[in-house]
Image (cartoon, grey):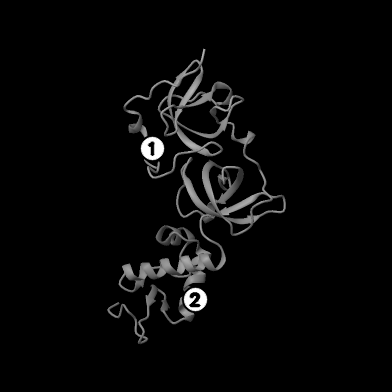
Amino acid sequence: MSRRAPSRPPSAAADTPRHADARAPQPAIGEVAWLRVVSVNDSGAFLDWGRPKDLLLPFGEQVGRPEAGRHVLVKINVDERSRPVASMRLNRFIADTSDELAPGDAVTLVVADRTPLGVKAVVEHRVWGLLYQDDLPRTLRRGERLDGYVRRVREDGRLDLSLAPLGGARRDQARERVLAALDEGDGFLALTDKSPAAVVKARLGVSKGAFKEAIGGLYKQRRIRLEADGIHRVDDDGTSADASR
């Protein structure tokens, strides 16, 4: 007797989590995705993956027992009959190391689990990597899909990751955010090189190191003035743009 996915209830879309991105592409075979459980029956759980026929998550590929309406992080594979099938047992399909990626490579990330050091993410749907807590500009949610970068390949082949580009690109990004914040603040930004890293991240979305590199470069170019109360933009004539302060 063939297995058929049950039809999706009309209210299925109502349970989409607030952090889901409606513009995200449909997940494909070979990818890791955060999917909603539509229903559960004797064959397993069925997941909404944006296609007319829901995706089977067999009991043998489950971790715990997912309930209808919940979301699960799965790898989409094919079974012995070339039919799409999901698995929550990611460690069976995601490698711990990579010899194909290099520092600076732009990659696609899917957020997985928290660790004492930060957040584990699946890189390019095939290898684990780590985003360090101190480098995160905000709280990441499980299943969130992001653009990121390989920060370092350790000697054992494991990957350290970053959400910001490395080197000059990282500095350029931070510089543009400082300048944009100065525009918003009429030439003043209430941050200094002594501001806590968490405050810098919350205000600009960049690391403290990238921020210091950026303001150091802008200061050398005489585009800003650094004072105890914060950063002041300098106009072309050498005067502060926020002269009223």
Neighbourhood count class around disc 2 (C-alpha, 10 Å): few under 14, some 14–19, many 20 upward: some
Number of numbered discs visible in the structure rendering:
2
Image quadrant containing the C terminus:
bottom left
Residue 107, percent from left and from top: 55, 52
Residue at x 58%, y 53% (from the top left corner): 161
Q: Is 176 left, or right, of 110 in this rendering? A: left
Q: What mark, if any, has residue 144 been given in the picture?
A: none
Which residue type does callout 2 highlight? Gly
Q: Which residue is nearer to you in this view: 21 or 154?
A: 21
Residue 31, percent from left and from top: 54, 39
Quadrant position of residue 152: bottom right
Residue at x 33%, y 74% (from the top left corner): 187
Q: What mark, if any, has residue 217 been given in the picture?
A: 2
Mark 2 residue element: helix
Residue at x 59%, y 27% (from the top left corner): 79
Q: Which residue is nearer to you in this view: 88 or 52?
A: 52
Up/down of 15 relative to 39, above or below: below
Mark 1 residue element: loop
Up/down of 154 relative to 211, above or below: above
Task: Check disc 1 and report the residue beneath it.
Answer: 17
Q: Is 232 left, or right, of 214 in this rendering? A: left
Residue at x 46%, y 66% (from the top left corner): 174
Q: Is 106 left, or right, of 232 in this rendering? A: right
Q: Is 134 left, or right, of 190 in this rendering? A: right
Q: Residue furthest front?
A: 82
